Image (cartoon, rainbow, N blue to C red):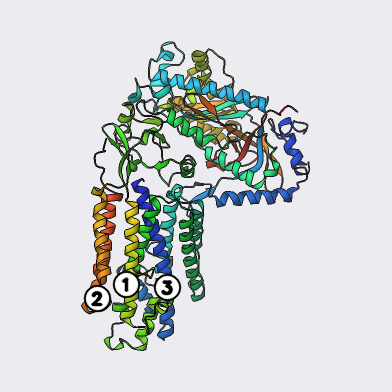
């Protein structure tokens, strides 16, 4: 498969997953804090912005436009590349470019999602509807993708992007909770703490899974256990990385090892480490450091894919 | 007849009706089938068709438009219908013309007999900006330069089809032919006379067959890898590039996806480098290879032309075809047909004056108000001055331009061309339409039955280009009626 097309499909998976997560994150955080904090949703948007790692960019944007609403930044901005709207536009641009590699149904669904994100209100009710639409559309696209796209290499690259992005977003959601929302130690274990952990579970669509897997009362370590190390939960770090591993192996079935070995090594080691890890130990030695390192390792995988596969300098042809 | 009551023919020939409004034979069956329709039925069917077009994303890109850069190409449900005997003649004429043009191209990059025999002035060939010195002494596989030709035809007041323009570089529009037919079959299947309309969906297969046929000598048909080279998703015809790639099942590549090693072309795949043998390029000559043409081109592939000259890759259409589809060269095509094939042109030209010839120039200056002035280079309907419709100011400017750079202009008498009933939102009005059939040439030439019928944006206009707001129609070539 053409390297450029492979890279595009990988990013199509990433952008669609990111759009879904931004919608979830905004939805849940705003909901949770509106209930718990009388001051209103401003703090919630700070959390969303922090989770997306966009605090500096938001500051800069505020300097230019002091009246800039966080909703206009996170959701509707065309200038901020990680906004929901920019993310969907990026996915749609790619879909148009690689249209011959995805099915007509997938293209049309992405196109519809894109046309839908160009308009929308900023009041609470229309935002909620908007998030629901985005989440449903992404789910529909993933379903159509699974059921209508050929079982070839491109499909595997799409899934590599999707699971790498999901692992990244799950870790960001958890990281943000621990170190940004809750700076006060005495709150730990209190009702506010518990409520916020439930919001984290909801952001990751994990509350029902948490109950089903019988984790007991909601506490930080238990939530961490589910979202990081439960191999049966489809948004957990270990699940995402092992799916990434599986799809990567299939995608590179015919790739010469000189190209494929770099990312393969990073992915294998990361999966082994996750499988060997234990929530209590991780928390004891510092969750934030763990996420920092985890995100760094995802970055290294992404880098290996780009350098050694998608944009590899052409070696001599074998003749 | 309800649908067309009150229809008025303005000037020129109408494809559906004679001057006293009796139906011409090819349309008899069609009119029978819409007999029960009223305007409301038509509008409803047209809306269904438009929705079908929008959903399948049949768009072209409009540059610098904020509201979304893609537009649909207006499409009208009333087809152009061509009778079997008319089409037979056109088909022969098109093959004849394309054969002669290919012979001409091989000749000017080879023996140059046509010049030494005085058929065409040497300056018109060798001073031409599209003449590629780099190609001199090179003959592409099977002696084919123009693998894909789009020949624009019109029909004059006497009912004679004439060639208006040859397009031998990267003619576009064939995707609309295929999608228009699909839309028609989806929305108005009841209007088709059963089994009597020539299908058009054979085109992608013929195209692929041709690409395999013109492969480099030392490559087998089985191992031939053909690709389409596009300038990228921002190009106005990207839909067509993507469409053809999907229809043929070949890879759609950009310049940066290809790399040249030892005069062989490779595709940059995830698995390494994979050889490429035939490139259907939708990138102009100038951008094809920064080492040979425009050095700052980001769209091309460095070293491509050398690989081509070494015979390791075939470029479709060949490099340097632009000399033959020029509006100045056009004037000489009937002579070229006579010279190479010993035949008279089956489809005549439109009378043409070229600024390059002194006697023609004098005539042009004198009669500009009665002529249509066109730039010799260029396409898309830009820069055309329609004398009889132009203001005094426009004419004065045009005359000045012509005086300054006579070689850049040609002129033709205002050509009446035939109209087809087209719905203007309330009623049918006659709109001028041209026809662009497509000819594929590999071991032999094949003509796609029909072609792209483009209609002008309003009843007055003589210009049918999509960039000027024109629309399109399905084109039906009827088969001989089977013996009862």
Q: Chain of mark 2?
A: A
Residue A127: x and y, percent?
A: 48, 72
Q: Are marks 2 and 1 on the same chain?
A: yes
Q: Chain of mark 1?
A: A
Which sits in the foreground, A315 or B105?
Answer: A315
Rounded to the nearest angstrom, the CA distance separating label 1 from label 3 is 14 Å
Query: Can residue A63 be seen from the camera position used here?
Result: no
Query: Can residue B32 be seen from the camera position used here?
Result: yes
- Which quadrant holds the C terminus of chain A? top left
Would you name the residue on which mark 2 appears? A282
In the structure shown, which secondary structural element does the residue marked by tag 2 occupy?
A: helix
Q: For residue A279, what is the image quadrant?
A: bottom left
- Lower position in the chain sequence, tag 2 or tag 1: 1
In the structure shown, which secondary structural element does the residue marked by tag 3 occupy?
A: loop
Would you name the residue on which mark 1 appears? A228
- Lower position in the chain sequence, tag 1 or tag 3: 3
Above or below, A20 against B83 in this view is below
In the structure shown, which secondary structural element does the residue marked by tag 1 occupy?
A: helix
Would you name the residue on which mark 3 appears? A205
Q: Residue at x 28, y 85 (%)?
A: A184
Above or below, B190 against A234 in this view is above
Q: Residue at x 48, y 40 (%)?
A: B244
Looking at the image, do the residues carrying marks 2 and 1 touch, with CB atoms under 8 Å apart? yes
């Amino acid at each position: 498969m053409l390297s450029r097309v492979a890279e595009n499909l990988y990013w199509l998976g990433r952008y669609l997953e990111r759009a879904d997560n931004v919608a979830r994150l905004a939805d849940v955080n705003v909901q949770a804090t509106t209930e718990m904090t009388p001051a209103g949703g401003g703090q919630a948007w700070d959390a969303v912005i922090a989770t997306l790692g966009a605090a500096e960019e938001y500051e800069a944007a505020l300097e230019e436009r002091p009246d800039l609403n966080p909703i206009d930044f996170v959701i509707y901005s065309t200038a901020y590349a990680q906004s929901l709207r920019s993310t969907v536009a990026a996915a749609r641009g790619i879909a148009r470019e690689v249209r011959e590699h995805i099915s007509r149904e997938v293209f049309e669904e992405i196109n519809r999602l894109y046309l839908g994100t160009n308009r929308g209100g900023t009041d609470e009710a229309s935002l909620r509807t908007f998030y629901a639409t985005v989440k449903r559309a992404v789910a529909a696209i993933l379903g159509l993708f699974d059921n209508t796209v050929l079982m070839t290499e491109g499909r595997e690259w799409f899934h590599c992007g999707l699971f790498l992005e999901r692992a990244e977003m799950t870790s960001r959601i958890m990281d943000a909770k621990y170190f940004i929302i809750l700076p006060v130690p005495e709150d730990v274990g209190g009702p506010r703490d518990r409520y916020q952990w439930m919001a984290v579970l909801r952001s990751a669509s994990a509350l029902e899974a948490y109950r089903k897997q019988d984790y007991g009362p909601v506490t930080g370590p238990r939530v961490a256990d589910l979202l990081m190390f439960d191999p049966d939960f489809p948004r957990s770090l270990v699940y995402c990385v092992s799916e990434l591993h599986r799809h990567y192996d299939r995608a590179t079935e015919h790739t010469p090892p000189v190209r494929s070995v770099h990312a393969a090594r990073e992915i294998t080691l990361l999966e082994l480490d996750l499988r060997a890890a234990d929530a209590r130990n991780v928390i004891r030695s510092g969750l934030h450091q763990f996420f920092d390192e985890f995100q760094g390792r995802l970055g290294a995988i992404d880098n290996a894919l780009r350098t050694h596969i998608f944009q590899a300098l052409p070696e001599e042809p074998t003749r | 007849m309800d649908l067309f009551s009150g229809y008025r023919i303005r000037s020129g020939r109408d494809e559906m009706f004679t001057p006293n409004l009796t139906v011409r034979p090819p349309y008899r069956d069609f009119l029978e089938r819409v007999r029960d329709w009223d305007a409301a039925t038509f509008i409803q069917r047209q809306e269904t068709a438009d929705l079908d077009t929008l959903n399948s994303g049949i768009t072209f890109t409009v540059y610098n438009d904020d509201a979304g850069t893609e537009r649909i190409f207006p499409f009208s449900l009333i087809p152009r219908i061509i009778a079997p005997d008319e089409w037979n003649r056109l088909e022969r004429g098109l093959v004849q013309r394309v054969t002669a043009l290919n012979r001409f191209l091989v000749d000017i990059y080879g023996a140059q007999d046509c010049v030494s025999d005085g058929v065409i002035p040497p300056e018109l060939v060798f001073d031409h900006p599209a003449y590629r010195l780099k190609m001199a002494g090179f003959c592409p596989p099977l002696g084919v330069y123009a693998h894909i030709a789009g020949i624009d035809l019109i029909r004059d007041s006497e009912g004679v089809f004439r060639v208006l323009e040859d397009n031998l570089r990267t003619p576009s529009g064939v995707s609309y032919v295929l999608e228009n037919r699909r839309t028609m079959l989806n929305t108005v299947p009841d209007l088709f006379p059963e089994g009597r309309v020539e299908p058009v969906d054979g085109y992608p297969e013929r195209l692929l067959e041709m690409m395999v046929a013109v492969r480099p000598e030392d490559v087998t048909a089985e191992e031939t890898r053909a690709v389409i080279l596009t300038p990228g998703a921002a190009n106005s015809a990207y839909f067509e590039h993507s469409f053809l790639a999907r229809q043929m099942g070949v890879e759609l590549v950009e310049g940066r996806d290809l790399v040249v090693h030892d005069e062989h072309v490779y595709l940059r795949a995830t698995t390494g480098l994979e050889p490429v043998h035939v490139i259907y390029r939708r990138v102009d000559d100038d951008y094809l290879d920064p080492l040979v043409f425009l050095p700052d081109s980001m769209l091309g592939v460095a070293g491509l032309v050398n690989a081509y000259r070494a015979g390791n890759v075939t470029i479709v259409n060949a490099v340097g075809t632009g000399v033959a589809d020029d509006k100045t060269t056009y004037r000489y095509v009937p002579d070229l047909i006579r010279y190479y094939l010993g035949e008279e042109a089956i489809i005549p030209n439109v009378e043409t004056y070229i600024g390059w010839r002194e006697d023609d120039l004098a005539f042009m200056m004198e009669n500009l108000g009665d002529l249509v002035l066109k730039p010799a280079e260029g396409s898309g309907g830009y820069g055309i001055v329609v004398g009889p419709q132009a203001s005094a100011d426009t004419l004065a400017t045009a005359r000045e331009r012509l005086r300054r750079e006579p070689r850049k202009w040609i002129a033709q008498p205002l050509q009446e061309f035939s109209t087809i009933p087209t719905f203007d939102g309330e009623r049918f009005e006659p709109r001028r339409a041209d026809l662009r059939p497509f000819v594929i040439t590999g071991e032999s030439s094949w003509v796609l039955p029909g072609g792209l019928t483009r209609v002008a944006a309003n009843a007055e206009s003589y210009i049918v280009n999509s960039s000027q707001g024109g629309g399109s129609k399905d084109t039906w070539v009827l088969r001989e009626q089977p013996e009862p």
